Image (cartoon, rainbow, N blue to C red):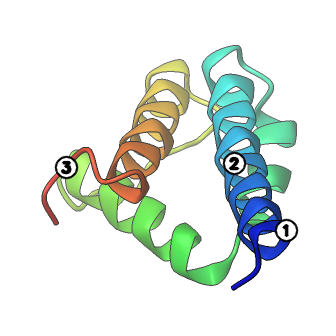
Amino acid sequence: MSPEGAAYGIEEYSKALCKQAEIAEAFYYGRIGEGVEGLLNLPEDVRLLIDQLIWDAAGGQAIDPTDEASAELIADAILFSLEEQMGLHAS
């Protein structure tokens, strides 16, 4: 891979992680519509990981994303998934 190709890949990866952080921020600050829209636009594998983290954290119960506690749980799940993607947690 060329240095330019590697630099482009790193830049795109970084942008994707930043986008996920922005989605978590939207949920954390109560911008639920923005957060849901952002989640729907993530790659399927990332959405599935986040969904599983939410499901686990909620004890297998359905949550209402408009509820303040649920929105915080969603934000936490997104941030945890970011950490996993960056290799900060063992899978």
Question: Residue under circle 3?
Answer: 89
Q: Check the image and report above or below for 89 versus 4.
A: above
Give me the disc on residue 14.
2
In which quadrant of the rendered view does residue 69 lie?
Answer: top left
Amino acid at pointer 2? Ser
Which is closer to the viewer, label 3 or label 1? 1
The residue lying furthest to the left in this view is: 90
Category of crowding for the residue at label 1, using alpha-carbon neighbours closer than 10 angstroms: few (below 14), some (14–19), many (at least 20): few
Disc 2/disc 3 C-alpha distance (Å) = 18 Å
Which amino acid, by three-letter code, is at mark 1? Glu
CB contact under 8 Å: marks 1 and 2:
no
Q: Quadrant of residue 39?
A: bottom right
Residue extending furthest top? Answer: 29
Q: How far is the residue under mark 1 from the one under mark 2?
A: 15 Å
Q: Is residue 45 above or below residue 66?
A: below
- For marks 3 and 1, the one nearer the N-term is 1
In the image: residue 11, left or right of residue 49: right
Work out how far the residue at label 3 is from the one at label 1, CA to CA, in angstroms: 29 Å
Horizontal side, residue 80 vs residue 91: left or right: right
Query: The C terminus lies in which quarter of the figure?
Result: bottom left
Rendered location of residue 60, percent (x, y): 22, 62
Q: Residue placed at 55% from the left, 30% from the top?
A: 71
Q: What residue sits right under mark 1 in the picture?
A: 4
Residue at the extreme front of the image, as rendered: 3
